[in-house]
Image (cartoon, rainbow, N blue to C red):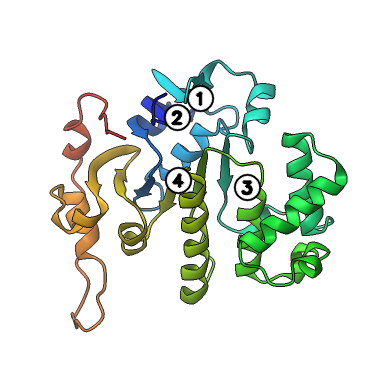
Amino acid sequence: MSDTLLRVRNLSVTYPGDDGDFRAVRGVSFSLGRERLGIVGESGSGKSTTGRAIMRLIQHPGRIESDELSLGDTDLRSLSERGMRKLRGRRIAMVLQDPKYSLDPVMTVGRQIAETHRTHMASSKAAARAAALEMLEAVHIRDPERVYGMYPHQVSGGMGQRIMIAMMLIAGPELLIADEPTSALDVTVQSQVLSIMDQLVRERGMGLILISHNLHLVSAFCDRVLVMYAGQIMEVCDSGRLAEAQHPYTRGLLAALPELGQRRAELPQLQRDPAWLDDIAAPMETRA
């Protein structure tokens, strides 16, 4: 059996507009094994849209097109919406940016986690509750019995994000997509949440796609990094060698990062060149 979990080839996402079609993602290709892959870029670069397209969460009138979009041996393009609903959460899951917009405000957090288990594992109410409590403990929540009965508005941002991770991992997916999972948290809590996510991903032998605008975070946390601009992949780097990146866009992003202990009158302005998009005549293929 292949260790490649996900294959994406020539993925495009298009939205119709008054002045013609807008391609939010253009010819993106990569493969993912049981590793941690970071996707970085500015706001509007297409990184979050890429993650949603993999989950088939692009709403009409948006269109997803690709030459290949497969999870293991499953062709995601051929599945009906009902088939995708069965697959989401069970084999592939997504943690979104802010838990207060993702959790149901009128259900306790424990019931929401247990409901995910019952939906995908066909478990009894008692078994789902036990699994939810075990998962709350796995994401380092103290007194899971008490937290099980709390509502989303009663938990902090950091605890809410841990609850979301618990909900997404309770059914044992093969792949987790985390879209800016720590951007709403302070630095200390960011580190805690990422550490928990890293531990669970490694223990379960999963694949992870971490979508972020934070180059420092991605280079420290991931194995490989895809750098996106205007819907396309500009460069692929091993995270440990990100400082050696060659593309002018990646170099510009790195130069714009402030560094402790260095005083500069102003940060350099990123210069964008329209020719960057013309340089990519064919879809870029990246190895798992």
Few, some or many residues within 10 Å of mark 4 (<14, 14–19, 20+):
many
- Secondary structure type for disc 3: helix
Q: Amino acid at mark 1?
A: Arg
Outermost residue to the right? 125
Disc with the residue nearer the chain's start (3 vs 4): 3
Q: Amino acid at mark 4?
A: Leu
Q: Amino acid at mark 3?
A: Met
Q: Residue at x 26, y 53 (%)?
A: 239
Q: Label 3 to label 2, Cα distance in Å?
A: 25 Å
Q: Label 3 to label 1, Cα distance in Å?
A: 26 Å
Disc with the residue nearer the chain's start (2 vs 1): 2
Image coordinates of residue 233 in percent, x first then y, are 28, 38
Residue 120's label in the rendered image is: none
Residue 208's label in the rendered image is: 4
Quarter of the figure with the N terminus: top left
Judged by depth in the image, the label closer to the viewer, 3 or 2, is: 3
Answer with left or right where residue 284 lies relative to residue 157: left
Q: Which residue is mark 2?
A: 13
